[in-house]
Amino acid sequence: MNSKLNGHHEEILSLRIQSYTLGMIQRWLSEQRQVNVCISAISRSIRRSLNTQRQHSLSVSGSDFDRYRSDVDASLQRRTYRRHLNKYIGLIENYRYVKGFGAEQILIELRAKGVKTSLSSIVRMLQVINEQKNKEFRC
């Protein structure tokens, strides 16, 4: 059924790992190996190759993936994103609820005041503020 791609599975997977798109792989196969196949056949080949490799890696004895993963997770410092903007929470609330600014406008105002932050940090801080307001409202 997949006879055109027999013998090319490893090359296809290697190209995919190198961030080739399916269209690029299709063109590569056509130019380099003179094999004309559809993109869905290439996708199936990649999926089968990955499944084969995954089954092999799961069957390898002595695999301590979980232990190493937990060791690495335990050594990572937990980041609290609101720590940087905590001292500006009142100012952010003022911009949001009194002046009606959006996250982009708040970012511009904070940068004008010399605060180095990102839009995603402001969005997270606004989410924290909204959660606090919802908790106060429920109680």
Image (tube, rainbow, N blue to C red):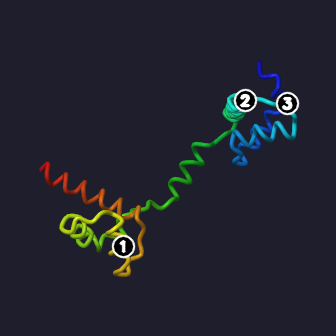
Left of 4 or right of it: where is 79? left
Read off the residue under disc 3.
7
Helix, strand or loop at mark 3: loop
Using the numbered discs, state the Cα–Cα distance from disc 3 to disc 1 in whole angstroms.
Answer: 56 Å
Instruction: Kindly identify the residue that appears in the image at 52 percent across and 53 percent down.
Output: 73
x, y (%) of residue 108? Answer: 36, 73
Helix, strand or loop at mark 1: helix
What amino acid is found at the position of numbered circle 2 in the picture? Cys
Q: Is residue 36 above or below residue 27?
A: above
Q: Is residue 7 above or below residue 98?
A: above
Q: Could you tell which of marks 3 and 1 lies nearer the N-terminus?
A: 3
x, y (%) of residue 32? Answer: 87, 40
Q: Could you tell which of marks 2 and 3 lies nearer the N-terminus?
A: 3
Using the numbered discs, state the Cα–Cα distance from disc 2 to disc 3 in whole angstroms.
Answer: 17 Å
**Between 41 and 139, the one nearer to me in the picture:** 41
What amino acid is found at the position of numbered circle 1 in the picture? Ile
What amino acid is found at the position of numbered circle 3 in the picture? Gly
Residue 17 in which image quadrant:
top right
